[in-house]
Image (tube, grey):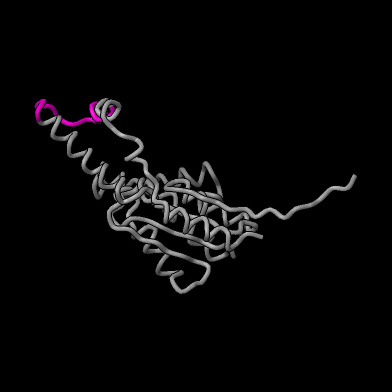
Amino acid sequence: MGICNRLISLFLFGQSWGSYAVGAVLNVHPEVKAAVMVSGFNRSIDMMRQPGRKIAGPAVSLILPCLGLYDYVKFGKFAGYTALGALKKSKAGIFITQSRDDQVVPVRYSFVLFHEEFQSNPRFRFREYQDRGHAYVYYSQESVRYRKQFDQEYREHMRQLRQKPSNESYNAYSAKHFDKSKGFELDVPLMNQMADFYRQYKS
């Protein structure tokens, strides 16, 4: 009995940390045909920069070199991998999308950086939004509006109770009142664009 060998196209998709991983892994996996990167950052240290600034202010600049050293001790050469460096080496098709109001990964560490480098490269496609935050880029505009309305209703609820908002109270309120079908409605046109992008690189 003969064995039929089939060519398999390898596609990647990642959001936030996953997006960084997708970019970084291209340093060692040239066989990847196409990748979608959502709200991702260029270097692992970039993910620590923004939250650290909120906690420690400008003093975070003193801490980051220590974190970078720890990263290197723990992961060796892999700690030095960047998405930007990998994208320069790779021949894969790359779809990058992010929202301008991202408070977790500022666009200057990601979308702007990649766009400035690759905007004229036909392998790359960019899609930028303005008001989808960090985690909800691929959800519909109706979903974005619903979440904003829901958050306003939660804050009003806490005001009437004369209590300060907290993660615990928000989670409890969400468990009772949040409509997942509205809050997690996908942006179908965007998802179709991503699927069509993958199809272009199908073997």
Q: Is residue 65 visible?
A: no
Question: Image point 39% across, 51% down: which residue?
Answer: 187
Q: Can you say whether 102 is above or below 175 in the image?
A: below
What percent of the width, then of the height, locates residue 158? 14, 30
Q: Is residue 161 visible?
A: yes
Residue placed most toward the observer, 56 or 141: 141
Instruction: Tell me: 8 left or right of 181.
Output: right
Query: Among all residues in the image, which is located at the extreme bottom?
Result: 120
Instruction: Tell me: 140 left or right of 70.
Output: left
Would you say residue 32 sits in the magenta stretch?
Answer: no
Q: The N terminus is located in which quarter?
A: top right
Residue placed most toward the observer, 82 or 18: 18
Question: Image point 41% across, 49% down: which residue?
Answer: 45
Question: Image point 47% across, 51% down: which residue?
Answer: 20
What percent of the width, then of the height, locates residue 89? 57, 64
Instruction: Tell me: 201 left or right of 70.
Output: right
Q: The C terminus is located in which quarter?
A: bottom right
Would you say residue 164 sits in the magenta stretch?
Answer: yes
Residue placed most toward the observer, 6 or 111: 6
What percent of the width, then of the height, locates residue 28? 61, 54
Please count the marks in the image: 0
- Span shown in magenta: 160-171
Query: Among all residues in the image, which is located at the extreme right?
Result: 1
Question: Image point 42% across, 51% down: which residue?
Answer: 188
What percent of the width, then of the height, locates residue 202? 63, 59
